[in-house]
Amino acid sequence: MSEQLEKKDSNLSTLRDNVNQLESRFEKLREDVISKLNECSDCIKSAKQLCQEAIETTTILENKLTNASNEEKEWKDIKIKLATTSIQGKVILDVGGEKYTTSVEVLTREKDTFFTALFSKQWQLERDPDDKNILMGTLFPNETLLKFEHKKKLNDFYGKTNQQWELIYKATRDGFDANTFHSHCNDKGPTITIIQSNNNYLFGGYTAIPWTSDNSYKSDTTAFLFTLINPHNIPPAKYLIDTSKTVYTVNHTSGYGPTFGGGHDIHLAHANDANNSSYTNFPYTYLDTTGKGNNTFTGARNFTTSDIEVFKLA
């Protein structure tokens, strides 16, 4: 009997050892499986990351190719315009009385330059009535309003880098009253209005809707306001229309100068050089993306103008 018990104990002990070994092996197997699963998970994460990076790289390359294609097309368009310009061959530059001889080909060899814009007819060519020389200083009369870099930035805002401009109204030349503005600008197609306040801040707006005098609001989803020079040293910025308020894009009241937005975001009063009845109520219809609110354009609500220019976009 004693021997049988001892034999059973021995068998139980052996069984226990076997179970412990199996448990140990199972635990090791479980750890190995978990380790492999973690490795697989890491591999999947790495693959996803690489895939995302590949997608982002592809998108960047596609955008660069698109931009390069657009730039190439614009440059070709400029080259075509240069080929058809009425000014060819030798050019004599009179710089402070000193004369220098060059050619249109040399002056327009590089794109995005003053002369490329000039000779490709992006700017108006104004000639001296006596000797027919081109007056570069009068491409934009009293050019304090629109420097070359400002025009380039506005073209970027508009979305066409080689846009042609035609000055149809200049307040210091034509008059500051509302009737004069409307007589020069009504029914002239898309326009950009440049406003200079008496403290030399520069701002304005674009609309594709031709100005009229029918005393109503007009809707234009492409319209925008902008600042070029402001009291906050904000770089040139574009302010889009609030898509829920497009019915108030521009105001065509006959007794107003150029007026944008309901409220109004920018309002030019009659005879705006002689009073401070012009004002901004921004942002009302247009979106403020630079955080200065109604102080954005001149630093105050009301202002007096020193000049206004309206350009027709051909």
Image (cartoon, rainbow, N blue to C red):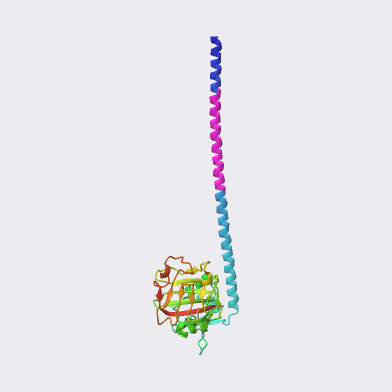
Q: Quadrant of the N terminus?
A: top right
Of residues 123 and 110, the one nearer the viewer is: 123
Q: In which quarter of the image is the C terminus?
A: bottom right
The spot of residue 293 in percent (x, y) is: 42, 67
Of residues 68 and 24, the one nearer the viewer is: 24
Of residues 279 and 56, the one nearer the viewer is: 279
Q: Residue at x 53, y 70 (%)?
A: 246
State the image quarter where residue 95 is shown.
bottom left
Does residue 93 appear in this view? no
The spot of residue 136 in percent (x, y) is: 49, 81
* Magenta-drawn stretch, dominant element (helix, strand or loop): helix
Q: Residue at x 55, y 47 (%)?
A: 46
The spot of residue 134 in percent (x, y) is: 51, 84
Q: Is residue 20 above or below residue 4?
A: below
Q: Give the range drawn in magenta.
A: 18-47
Q: Residue at x 58, y 71 (%)?
A: 74
Looking at the image, which residue sits at the far top? 1
The spot of residue 306 in percent (x, y) is: 42, 80
Check if residue 84 falls in the magenta segment.
no
